[in-house]
Image (spheres, rainbow, N blue to C red):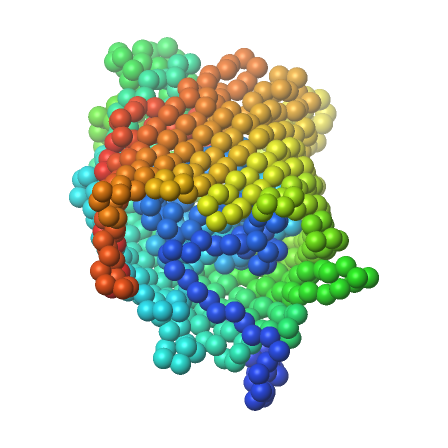
Amino acid sequence: MRHHLPSHLRLRPASATGLAVSLLLLNPAWGQSGPAEKTLSAVQVSDRTAAPTADVTGFGDVPAREVPISTTVIDRAELDRLGARRLADLTQLDASVTDGYNAPGYWDTLNIRGYTLNQNYNYRREGLPISAETVIPLDNKERIEILKGTSGLQAGTSSPGGLVNYVVKRPTETPLRQVTLSTGERGSRLLALDLGGRSDNKVLGYRLNIAHEDMRPLINNTNGHRDLFAFAGDARLSRDTLLSAELEWSQQTQASVPGQSLLGNQLPSAGDPNINLNNQPWSKPNEFRGLTGSIKLDQAINSQWSWQAVYGAQRLKTNDRLAYPFGCYDAASGAYYADRYCPSSATGKAGVGLADIYQFESNNERRRQQALQWRLQGNTVVAGIPHQVSTGLLRSVLNNRLDFQADGSAAVGQATTDGLTVIPAPNPPLAFNSPNTNRDEYNTELFVQDVARWTPRLSSWMGLRHTRLDRHSVQNTGARETRYRQSFTSPWLGLSYDLGQQMSVYGSWGRGVESSVVPNRAYYANAGTGIPAAESTQKEVGLKHASADLSWQLAYFDIRRPALYESQITNATQVAQLCPSSLSDCRSQTFSGDAHHRGLEASASSTLGPWRLNGSALLLRAVRNSPDATLNGLAPTNVPKQVLRAHAEYRIAQVPGLSVGGGLTHEGSRKVVSTSSEQIDLPAWTRFDAQLRLLQKQGEAGSTVWQLSIDNLFNRRYWRESPTSYGHVYLYPGAARNWRLTMKTSF
């Protein structure tokens, strides 16, 4: 029998909406006829203004230069220059952000400071937790904020790499009318509409974004399309009361691309990047649909204090389908390659291996996330010391419901890695009888943050978040049920000193927490049990500078993250007691040892006359510390040792509005396989991009921007990343050279 929380503990949309309405009705400011003591600042949004703060830190409207946390804010103008369509595109902008497992046609996974972000716990939208197990459109996003490092203070339970926060476009103070048209090399085309403004009395505001894109990538058999409808509105109910809401609907249909792999013990040369092994006549595209929104009430209490209540909900539906290669049985030699493909000797073709092909289909996957947060913030003086204080409560609920899936235990055939093999459709078709796992999570988080200004230059920063979680999972057959509850507290401390000349130095220490449950498999002695919460720690010191024409930051970080460790149980008596159904393979899983990442990261941006320059760099040393001598000291896979990003744009004075630009992306070598018996490296690679932009003014407010972008200008062939998924090594090539022409007009 499934267990459920009592109904009074569940978070429901109706109750959250009712709370917001109640707060409005109880607001004493509605009865005031005179001016309020504090007014809410007007929301002014345009694609020409960068965000002065990073909301993802949780410290409110404090300038990012002052906060002792490493952040990157990518505003709308930068997203447009990049032509970003998906989160993975942002790896071109920040050296600390790299690919984690970014298959075309699938959701995006990022690594930050060498740690892979968790799709369920490391992503935010408007500051509230969301699931990133979907395709998230960028057309209606005003900016994307990236916090680098441990985030226990901001997120409770999360991977120590960092956080990504999506901030949606909001109503503009002046009328906004924009149309964007874009076309690409094989006929890809995008049409997007962006409208914003306010009513004549400035009380009501609106923002509407509509987009449709027909995708025609160079990669074989990956055509698709996507649509977006997003609306944001607000109402200035009084001088100190602002009610805002936004809603986003999106859908995308596109086939995904499985990776290449090692051929036996050889790293193949990076050949045609347009090969798609998911190209069988019975292959089906992935389908992603999402409905996400939030409602927020901001209330000024007086000149020093205000509170905010916000409710957010997310509804995702996914059809996940793939003809995927996994391992290979070499009939000629009798060898089975579990984590890679057969060598070229299995095909007799140079550089062409062989892979077992499986059919996977999981339809009607439903993921629902809700979150309700209340926050009080303000300024006070204690013993003569000014404090900026923020405290609040977050309640979030995650419910995943997954139907039976078709996932045959036997391969439906074998295919050569050149993508030329045609495999007949399985006959009879695979049945949808493979069980899936449903999940429920209930989190309650209480947090407090404080900034104390000891002198005009010296400030201390403190934060504390207490998390109580209740997690439950069970297969849709009713089998393999697990449930565990945990409580933990995540502290964070920082100190900053203003050096003058708009420069500051800082140091910080913080703790992040992750929780895990042992897979409910017969070969685990502790199957289905919760593992004690794993505490990551980070130390960081840095320098920051920000002025009108130059900003830069330099940081050194040291992060230790507990590592999952599996040990074999060999005592016959213990095996019989603990693994009676798996006598030949009995193991235990727990946290032991750690993944230790130390690095130096730097970034800078500047405007020098006609030049616009920005860049970032990362030097990273990542190793595994383990009680197993065969693992101790080894580097993790898919983590580059050094990364460099650089961009430059030059305005040509002889042609008003014309500028030419270029970008360089370099990633150092990384491990594809890292064991005591085998070491295989992915070579370093460098790519150049180019842009040509022309700005045409039309009257006082109107303008048209033409932009020609060429990615991978020299058509380099290289392996972009080497993720490991379900114990299998994959290789993803860099995209071939392609161009894109975009026109964005405002009227």
Q: Is residue 17 visible?
A: no
Horizontal side of residue 393 vs 619, given as left or right: right
- Looking at the rendered structure, the number of numbered marks drawn on it comes to 0
Q: Quadrant of residue 383?
A: bottom right
Residue in view at x 65 percent, y 58 percent: 444
Q: Nearer the viewer, residue 438 or 33?
A: 33
Residue 62 in the image, given as x and y percentages of width and height: 59, 56
Q: Quadrant of the N terminus?
A: bottom right
Horizontal side of residue 597 vs 117, given as left or right: right
Residue 308 in the image, given as x and y percentages of width and height: 58, 68
Residue in view at x 26 percent, y 26 percent: 714
> In the rendered image of this protein, does residue 63 appear above or below residue 518?
below
Horizontal side of residue 518 vs 172, given as left or right: right
Horizontal side of residue 370 vs 213, given as left or right: right
Q: Quadrant of residue 176?
A: bottom left
> In the rendered image of this protein, does residue 198 appear above or below residue 64?
below
Residue in view at x 69 percent, y 22 percent: 627
Residue farthest to the left, as pictured: 187
Residue 43 in the image, given as x and y percentages of width and height: 46, 67
Q: Is residue 237 visible?
A: yes
Q: Nearer the viewer, residue 419 or 721?
A: 721
Q: Quadrant of the C terminus?
A: bottom left
